[in-house]
Amino acid sequence: MSFAQYSEKNYLYRVSDQRGHKANYNKSLRVLLLSVSRKMDSCLAVYYIISLLSMVFFTSNYAQYEASVAKPKPSALFVFGDSTVDAGNNNFIKTTFKSNFPPYGRDFVNHVPTGRFTNGRLASDFIASYAGVKDIMPAYLDPTIGIEDLMTGVTFASAGTGFDPLTATLSSVISLEQQMEYFKEYKSKIEMLIGKESTHELITKAVFLISAGTNDFIVNYYGLGEAVDQYIYPNVTSYSDFLLQNVENFIKELMNQGARKIAMVGLPPMGCLPVVITLNKDAATHGRKCVEPMLSVAIEYNIILENKLKAMQTAETKLYYADIYKPILDMIQFGERKLGFEEVSTGCCSSGYIEAGILCNINSPVCDDASKYVFWDSVHPTESAYHYVFTTVRPVVDMVLNDYIN
């Protein structure tokens, strides 16, 4: 069955339902008109009949107009990256970087821990729902995924990964390179279902979202005894350049695979993550303030990234930059006064200072109301924080959706 036939089948069901409703409506209208004509004199009956017919005509045409101006939606959403967009792929690999146990997922549908590193939904889930693609993003490695979920997109993301292959190796997770291989595997599966031409159409009409880079700095460059080779990358600028080159290579490969609309997420204010503050003596002992040098690194990285995306754009492929630095910093700096967040520098789970993953588990104390916290654990935002981030990047999402019209 082709992609077009798959869509047509669902459309025919809707049309069939509409025809049934229309037949019942016309029957009721005839009964009403007959009743009116019997009870009133001919002139008054004609007046009511004309009025009713006008109303029916207007309603029918307005419905057709609404349908004609409805925004077309992407065929699918494909997501690559780290824990900010991992919906549970790490559940199916050998790694300690997992979150498929309580209290993770406490506020998710049916309170199920899915492998998302938060208490509920991720920003990518809100984006998928808003774009009309699906309610939540499924993990590609989940063996229970049905055909419809496959057809409308999946996330290949893996918590703990980054654009530096060493980052994924340190955490025993799925590298961005392997995520690309999974995408190619995905394409082969879909081609077997709907054919090459229809698969190409599905891919070219889809949206691609990439969110990664934070782990390269906090786990790799600054963490674990500075695992990065300091001779190759003597300073953070040279390391940032290396990462950004890998970003460019990854995007180019997506373009080669047929991607035509690609959104890239920038770095967050890394110096404000609770775990980063805790591990920095000065920040931890002076009111848990953000680590300024790491904020500067993120700012400079994001500026170069945004310019790189503009330069890479082609007539065929549109690239979009999504800024998450400012909304997360706003929640931290102004959350208590303006946005309803009461705790901005520690996580909801356990002490909130250093716990994440297996250190945030079923035996950990958890705050009563996660919506008052910016962070769920010492690294990852709460569902409420992710939703706020989504509202701030929604103009970018709208820009992508509007490009389906133009």
Image: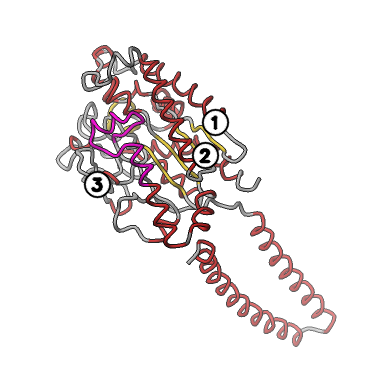
Most foreground residue, 102 or 46: 102
Q: Position of residue 219 (x, y in %)?
A: 27, 26
Q: Which residue is mark 2?
A: 394
Q: Which comes before the other along the chain, label 3 or label 1?
A: 3
Judge whether 390 appears above or below 20 on screen: above
Circle number at residue 91? 3
Q: Which comes before the other along the chain, label 2 or label 1?
A: 1
Q: On the picture, is 121 further left or further right than 276?
A: right
State the CA–CA distance, disc 3 to disc 2: 29 Å
Q: Position of residue 377 (x, y in %)?
A: 27, 33
Q: Position of residue 46 (x, y in %)?
A: 82, 79
- What crowding class fits label 1: few (fewer than 14 Cα within 10 Å), some (14-19), or many (20 or more)? few
Whether residue 178 is in magenta: the answer is yes
Q: Secondary structure at mark 2?
A: helix
Q: Which residue is mark 1?
A: 312
Q: Position of residue 342 (x, y in %)?
A: 34, 30
Report which quarter residue 40 is drawn in.
bottom right
- Residue at coordinates 20% horizontally, 33% vertically from top-left? 350
Q: On the picture, is 279 further left or further right than 185?
A: left
Query: Residue flagged by tag 1: what amino acid is it?
Result: Met
Q: On the picture, is 287 further left or further right than 318?
A: left
Q: Secondary structure at mark 1?
A: helix
State the CA–CA distance, disc 2 to disc 1: 23 Å
Judge whether 281 appears above or below 60 on screen: above
Whether residue 357 is in magenta: the answer is no
Q: Secondary structure at mark 3?
A: helix
Query: Residue flagged by tag 2: what amino acid is it?
Result: Arg
State the CA–CA distance, disc 3 to disc 1: 35 Å
Extent of the magenta region:
160-182
- What crowding class fits label 3: few (fewer than 14 Cα within 10 Å), some (14-19), or many (20 or more)? many
